[in-house]
Amino acid sequence: AQSVTQLDSQVPVFEEAPVELRCNYSSSVSVYLFWYVQYPNQGLQLLLKYLSGSTLVKGINGFEAEFNKSQTSFHLRKPSVHISDTAEYFCAVMYGGATNKLIFGTGTLLAVQP
Amino acid sequence: NAGVTQTPKFRVLKTGQSMTLLCAQDMNHEYMYWYRQDPGMGLRLIHYSVGEGTTAKGEVPDGYNVSRLKKQNFLLGLESAAPSQTSVYFCASRPRGVGTEAFFGQGTRLTVV
């Protein structure tokens, strides 16, 4: 079945500390992977995406993610977080052959504390 | 430069009532989607459309109907609302093609009592 898993529902972290948000997807020949961010009471906006090529993808606001095909993962990282990064982060996947559908994970709430 | 606009933003319905949520996009996107967001469940796809006059079922289509009579509009209907349909509903659109960015509306918070 086509799915994406975000095991951590909430990640608390102190300001200026590094953070990693985990995302795993069900294996497929071709996948396209995305991270979206949702600030309180807003819609979602794209942070970064992986389509092909280099497995390390850089996005907005200092975030980056690494595509790992053998581990079927696409973890999101930031070396130093700010209070303003507090938001919910969603991993999403689009499978080759079904590129009409964008399937989301359950989300991870990043709570940055001073 | 409106992007994706959802109407209304908030609504309270009584069980059994019907309503229509409107999504309008001004970016000439081919694909449009309706999701619902519930705590701990992320965004689940209700219905989607790959072009004017076409619709398809997503993961949780039961209790909802959709129509895409015009390219820029995607309507989500609830014929007989149930408390289980209390949720935040998001519309999104994106251009045709692999990996194109989806743009989201601000959401509609629906409560069914």
Image (cartoon, rainbow, N blue to C red):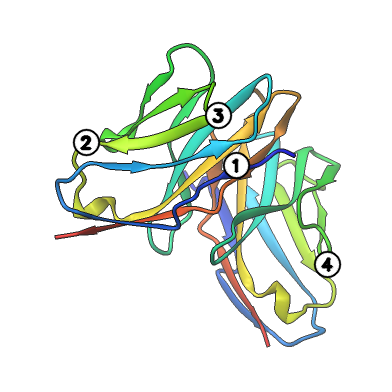
Q: Secondary structure at mark 3?
A: loop
The residue labelled by disc 4 is: B63
In the depicted view, which residue is nearer to us: A85 or B14? A85
Task: Read off the chain for label 3.
Answer: A
Tell me the kind of residue under disc 3.
Thr
Res. B112 mark: none
Rounded to the nearest whole Å, what is the CA distance between mark 4 and mark 2?
44 Å
The answer to whether marks 1 and 2 mark residues whose Cβ atoms lie closer than 8 Å is no
Rounded to the nearest whole Å, what is the CA distance between mark 3 and mark 2?
22 Å
Q: Secondary structure at mark 4?
A: loop
Q: Is residue B9 above or below residue B72?
A: below
Comparing labels 1 and 4, the label whose residue is closer to the camera:
1
Tell me the kind of residue under disc 2.
Pro
Q: Badge 3: how crowded within 10 Å, few (<14), some, or many (20+)?
A: some
The residue labelled by disc 1 is: A4
Q: Is residue B76 left or right of residue A22?
A: right
Rounded to the nearest whole Å, what is the CA distance between mark 1 and mark 3?
10 Å
Q: Quadrant of residue A62?
A: top left
In the depicted view, which residue is nearer to us: B49 or B41? B41
In the depicted view, which residue is nearer to us: B2 or A83? A83
The answer to whether marks 3 and 2 mark residues whose Cβ atoms lie closer than 8 Å is no
Res. A72 mark: 3
Tell me the kind of residue under disc 4.
Gly
Mark 3 or mark 2, which has the lower sequence index?
Answer: 3
Task: Read off the chain for label 2.
Answer: A
All told, the count of numbered labels is 4
Q: Secondary structure at mark 1?
A: strand
In the depicted view, which residue is nearer to us: A107 or B7? A107
The residue labelled by disc 2 is: A79
Q: Position of residue B27 (x, y in %)?
A: 58, 37
